[in-house]
Every structure is written in C-alpha cells, then in structure tokens.
Amino acid sequence: MFHRSIALALLLLTMTSCEAFRFLVVFPMASKSHSILGHGVVNHLLQAGHEVVHVTAFPRDKPAPKLKEIVVPNIFMAIAKEDPAGFAAFNLQNIANSGNPADSSFFFNIVFNFHKLFFEEPKIVQFLSDPQEKFDAVIIEWFFSDVIAGIAPLFQCPLIWVGSTEAHWQVLKLVDGVTNPSYNADVFSANTPPLTFWQRIQELWTMVKKIVTISFFITPKEKTLYDSFYPKIAALRGVQMPSYDEAVYNGSFLLLNSHPSIGTPFNLPESAKYVGGYHIDSKVPPLPEDLQKLMDNAKHGIIYFSMGSNLKSVDMSTAMRESLLQMFAKLKQTVIWKFEGELDNVPSNIHLVKWAPQQSIFSHPNLNFFITHGGQLSTTEAVHYGVPVIGIPVLGDQYVNMKAVVRKGFGIKIQLAEDMAKDIYVAIQEMLANPSYKQKAKEISQIYHDRPVPPGKELVHWVEHVVRTRGAPHLRSPALLLLWYQKMYLDLIVLIILALLILRSCIPKKSKQTTLKKKEKKK
Ligand SMILES: *[C@@H]1O[C@H](CO)[C@@H](O)[C@H](O)[C@H]1NC(C)=O
C-alpha cells in the first residue's frame, strides 16, 4: 500500500512537472567544437525528460534512452575534395602566412558548399522524407547559411536557432534586423567598440560588402537549392513549402552561445537570449591518473597549451614547432601541450597529450594559465573556471574573442606568426610576474556565474516556452515587418527630396522674375 502511494505520487509529480516533447536537433557544422555545442543542447533536453533526434557527425559513445542519432559522415572531408584550395586556407601554416581566412568572400562559398553537401547526404534525404517523423520544434545551428531554415516548415513546427559564436549582425538579422555597425563590430573583425572614426567606416564597409556579396552571389544559389530540395520532400509529407524568405525569417527564437561577461554586450530582441556556457558540465570529470599526478606535483605550476580541436598542432611548420619546444624548455613550469602527433626528444618539463580533458585541467589549482587560439568554447571555459589566457587568434571569431579578453584585462594577445615563440615567451614572463590577470579572470568569472539560473536551465526554459506558446509569436520583433529602406527612413528622405524639387520648380521662377523686375526698376 505504502509503495503504491509513493509510485502514485511520483507519477503525479512527473505528470505535473513537465510535458515531454520531441525535438530535432541539427548541427550541420561537422567539426568537433560545434558538435560539442550540439551534444550540450541534446543533453539538457534529455535531462529535462524530452525525446530527441540528433543529426550529428560525432555520435556519442553510449546510446541514451529517448535519443536517436542520425549519424552523417564528416562533410568537412568532402569539402576538402570539392574545394581543396579553400580547405587548405584553413590550415594553421597557411593562416600564419596569409591571415584570417574567414574574413573573405570565399568563406561564404565554402559554407554554402558545405550545406549543399549536407542536403545531398542520402541519410539526411531519407530522414527528412520519412512521414513518420514528427517534432514539436527543430533546433538548428545557424552557420552563415540560411537555406537550412526549410527544415522547420517541412515538419510544420517552430524553428529555434542556435548561434555558436558571440552575437553579430548576420545572426541577429534572422530574428530582428542588422545591428548598427558604428558600435557593433563584425564577428570576424579585429575591431572592438568603442570604435574610432576610421574603424566605424571599416565596419560599415565590411557590412555593405558582405550584404552585397551575399545578396548577389550566395542567396540566389541558396534559393535554387531550397527550391530544388524541399518541395519534393514536402510533397511526400503532404505539406507545401513557404517561400525561401518566409522560411528564413520565421525563426521563433535564437539561443546565443555567449554572455556579456565573455564578449561584448549587444542589444538583443526579446526572442534572443545568451546561454553561453551551457555545454559545460556542472560536475567536472576527474583527471586521468597520469595528469592528476603531473599537475599535483608541478612545484612551479602548470601552463596548458592547446590550439583547439580544429587547428592541429601537427600542422605547424617544423621551425615553428621546434622554436616553441625550445622556448617552453627554458621555463621552470610544467607545460601540458595538446599535440596530436608524435615528437622525439621532448624536453622533460613538456608533457604532450593527444586529447586533453580541458575542464578538469582548468579546475586544478596548480594551473597558472592557458595558451589558446581563443575559440569561443575555450574562451568560455576559461571564464567559467577563472583562468587567465594568452591567446593566438587564428581564424573566424577568435580575433573578436581575444580583443574582448584583452580589453577585460584577463589575457594577452599574440600575433600568429612563424616566429611567435619569442613573443609568447615575453607574454609568459608578464603573466607569471603580474597577478592582475589572474585576479581579473576570477572577477570576470564571478560576473559570468552571477545569473538568475544556470545557462542550461535557461536554454531548456526557452525551448519549452517556444513549444508551449506555439512559436512564441509574442516575442517576435516588429523589425521583421519592415523592409530595409523603411527602417532607414529612405522612403521619407525620398519624399522630402521630391517635395523640395517640386517646391523649387515653383519658387525660383517667381524670385527670378522679382529680381528681374528690381533690376529693371533700378535701370
Ligand atoms: C512560422 O512559424 C509559426 C510558428 O512556428 C508557424 O505557425 C507558421 O506556420 C510559420 N510560417 C511559415 C510561413 O512557415
């Protein structure tokens, strides 16, 4: 009897606490760091009792109840074949010589090709064509391509975007409008507000250039892909596709993987929220035994060096690698270097690891600081654990991230170059001598943690809110109802110019006549 009432109470509790929904989570970017964000979303939704279908190139080790994974091959590799020159531009050595490859128009082409290959993938086509599949909402990573928005109307459910970087005008355009470039830098920019006169012009120019490039060269290709891909599949499901524009600008919500403590504050519409840090486990997994011993015994502390999951240290030139090894060998500190290959004659204070349990390393008290590429996940994790950083931005948003780190005072930025070892050495000495970086890192970390609810909870709340309110139309920005020239009052300006022209065509004749008359009188 007692057991039965407990069972009944539990049943009631689960019934009242939440209604279970079914979600589709799609993170098309087949890269390790983006997939970490995808798994983070999935984990929180599963924990909240929902059912999830996850499209990913990185399946988890163990299956989970209520989770179905659609495993697609790593499209990155296919891109390498399709566009070898573009792909090679993202190699560490090439970037060291020619700069941020994301800050160019061919980046948009690569991203487009990427999405095209995604929709050519038989497993994707088969899954999307299956009329048995039904969802309460689809959660999609937006990565510089809009065509993927069509998945939501296919399933006739609300669309929730995830932005994997700091907020920026291109992603905010989907749920609100473009931001003012005079105080919001582009996500690939090296500028950070407050902007000088020239920087404001630079930002405006970048925006205009990108808008023109995208509207003339990318969007037409996307529309063609949209029209050739979705309607066929929609017919199988018995639904009709809205137009490309209707689909792209119909997102219900935008979750942003950032936080003002990490980056730059942005004006967000009601339908966008920062949930940066949601991918971080509240329980830190223990270190492997060898690393635990190494870190415990490091008398002078630990320096942790990792260039992230996309940029491989093995891609460094021999000269760069050797100079880094020699420089690290001069230090008293122990260096943990995430290095994917094998090396001979490694100095005794350097410990190479193929894979690093980054969060467990961050939470060890003997860690002095972190040398990083400044990726969004690494920066977020450093802030989460209050670890100061030396950053060597390589591509994409890493420049913006490191600018913010330097401005906030918890890090030093180094220019990526073949001979950067000497600059890193100087930065290391400064880091070791000056305690202000660590203090600042702790301060920023406190700001980061000072939120009403942890980011994972907030993420689940808004996702459920969108489903419960059938697409959250009450949050939708009215900016989406206006055309760009209406927002800029260009219609008013045209009206004023017309009025002035009309006035001029009436008045000057009279005044000419009167001046003529006056002249005549004088004569
Ligand atoms: C836009 O989204 C809402 C909410 O999900 C949905 O009801 C509506 O049908 C969508 N409109 C189009 C044109 O897809």
Image (cartoon, rainbow, N blue to C red):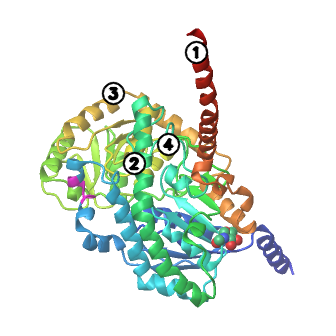
- Provide the residue designation for mark 1: 520
Choose mark 3 or mark 1, whichever is in front.
1
N-term mark: 2 or 4: 2
The disc label shown at residue 263, or none: 4
Residue 68 in the image: state x and y as whole percent. 54, 80
Label 4 element class? loop
Give yes or no for contact between labels 1 and 2 (Cβ–Cβ under 8 Å): no
- Kind of residue at badge 3: Ala
Is label 4's Cβ within 8 Å of ligand 1? Answer: no
- Kind of residue at badge 2: Phe
- Provide the residue designation for mark 2: 188
Q: Is residue 91 left or right of residue 454?
A: left
Label 1 element class? helix
Choose mark 3 or mark 4, whichever is in front.
4
N-term mark: 2 or 3: 2
N-term mark: 1 or 2: 2
Cα–Cα gap, marks 1 and 4: 72 Å
Query: In the picture, residue 399 is in which quadrant?
Result: top left
489, above or below 140, in the image: above
Point out the stretch of residues depicted in magenta.
89-94
